[in-house]
């Protein structure tokens, strides 16, 4: 589930009936807690919080969440240092809760069956990583990859995206809207630069280049409020996937832009069927 996706705050929930993790906590801790309660997920223990980078819209509630649920916070050493310097995080992560990750080194998340591998993602933060998540459903391995706040597509980004069946990838802006919009010149340069954000077309190109038969769901994240629309993002990616032989929609890849300030539905990922929406994630039996 996406709890929020964009400059107003980013937070993503991945869990089973027994445990969960969060990636980023850019919403207030109480807001995260209330959303989980509304979605009937409040009783699932959160075992870890993983941070992509140290910008405020990704860390605002990190310390409070870590304290509330008594979970460790995983990030690169540079990101932890950056969080210490960020005034948007008024309460710092307690030393006892800090854990460090390294590029391309798989980590078995304590008290879970998740294996997570961080990988370098270019952005103008102190540091930035994407996360490749593996979880075994019976004899089959499920792979999820999240790439957000990505200034330029690199070989590392392509490599990890190409391995996953379920993708959360940034489609931040429509280039024409950005360049003809109200942003000052320096900000347009920053967004379009190698430390900025992926455009719809750059996201589409990445997904087309890494297309493989196993892809089931693509969630488009971190859409700009001023320089994009969900429809523009969807259409750009849909065209690229179809032009490379993919089926988008019924019987093929489900493509979905995530809303900025409204939590998504809860989706269940399974090895034996495509992801499905479930009002009660843990109702009934798992395939």
Image: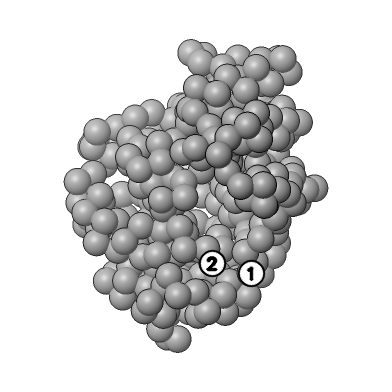
Mark 1 in CB contact with mark 2 (< 8 angstroms): yes
Q: Which mark is residue 206?
A: none
Dividing the picture into quadrants, the one containing residue 30 is bottom left
- Image quarter in which the N terminus is found: top left
Q: Earlier in the sequence, mark 1 or mark 2?
A: 2
Which residue is depicted at the point 33% across and 35% down?
Answer: 265
Say which element carries label 2.
loop
Dividing the picture into quadrants, the one containing residue 96 is bottom left
User: As drawn, is 48 to the left or to the right of 134?
Assistant: left
Q: Which residue is identified by label 2?
A: 54
User: As drawn, is 181 to the left or to the right of 206?
Assistant: left
Depth check: give the residue in front, 198 or 48. 198
Residue 204: image location, x then y, percent:
67, 29
Q: Which residue is identified by label 1?
A: 126
User: As drawn, is 172 to the left or to the right of 241?
Assistant: left
Which residue is depicted at the point 36% across and 47% down?
Answer: 3
Residue 140: image location, x then y, percent:
55, 40
Residue 233's place in the image compared with 18, above or below, is above
- Distance in Å between CA atoms under marks 1 and 2: 7 Å
Which residue is depicted at the point 70% across and 44% down?
Answer: 192
Which residue is depicted at the point 61% across and 54% down?
Answer: 130
- Image quarter in which the C terminus is found: top left
Say which element carries label 1.
loop
- For the question of whether residue 132 can be seen, the reply is no
């Amino acid at each position: 589930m996406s709890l929020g996706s964009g400059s107003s705050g980013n937070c993503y929930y991945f869990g089973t009936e027994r445990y969960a993790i969060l990636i980023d906590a850019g919403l207030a801790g109480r807001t995260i807690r209330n959303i989980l309660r509304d979605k009937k997920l409040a009783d699932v223990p959160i075992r870890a919080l993983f941070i992509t980078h140290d910008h405020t819209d990704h860390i605002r509630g990190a310390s409070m969440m870590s304290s509330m649920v008594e979970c460790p916070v995983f990030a690169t050493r540079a990101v932890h240092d950056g969080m210490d310097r960020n005034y948007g995080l008024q309460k710092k992560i307690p030393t006892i809760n800090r854990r460090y990750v390294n590029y391309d080194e798989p980590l078995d998340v304590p008290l879970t069956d998740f294996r997570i591998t961080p990988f370098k993602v270019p952005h103008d933060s102190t540091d930035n990583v994407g996360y490749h998540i593996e979880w075994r459903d019976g004899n089959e391995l499920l792979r999820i990859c999240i790439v957000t706040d990505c200034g330029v597509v690199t070989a590392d980004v392509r490599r990890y995206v190409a391995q996953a069946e379920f993708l959360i990838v940034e489609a931040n802006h429509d280039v024409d809207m950005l360049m003809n919009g109200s942003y000052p010149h320096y900000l347009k340069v920053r967004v379009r630069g190698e430390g900025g954000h992926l455009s719809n077309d750059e996201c589409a190109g990445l997904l087309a280049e890494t297309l493989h038969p196993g892809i089931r769901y693509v969630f488009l994240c971190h859409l700009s409020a001023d320089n994009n629309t969900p429809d523009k993002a969807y259409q750009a990616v849909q065209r690229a996937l179809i032009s490379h032989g993919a089926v988008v929609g019924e019987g093929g890849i489900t493509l979905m832009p995530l809303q900025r300030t409204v939590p998504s539905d809860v989706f269940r990922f399974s090895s034996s069927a495509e992801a499905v929406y479930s009002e009660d994630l843990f109702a009934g039996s798992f395939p």
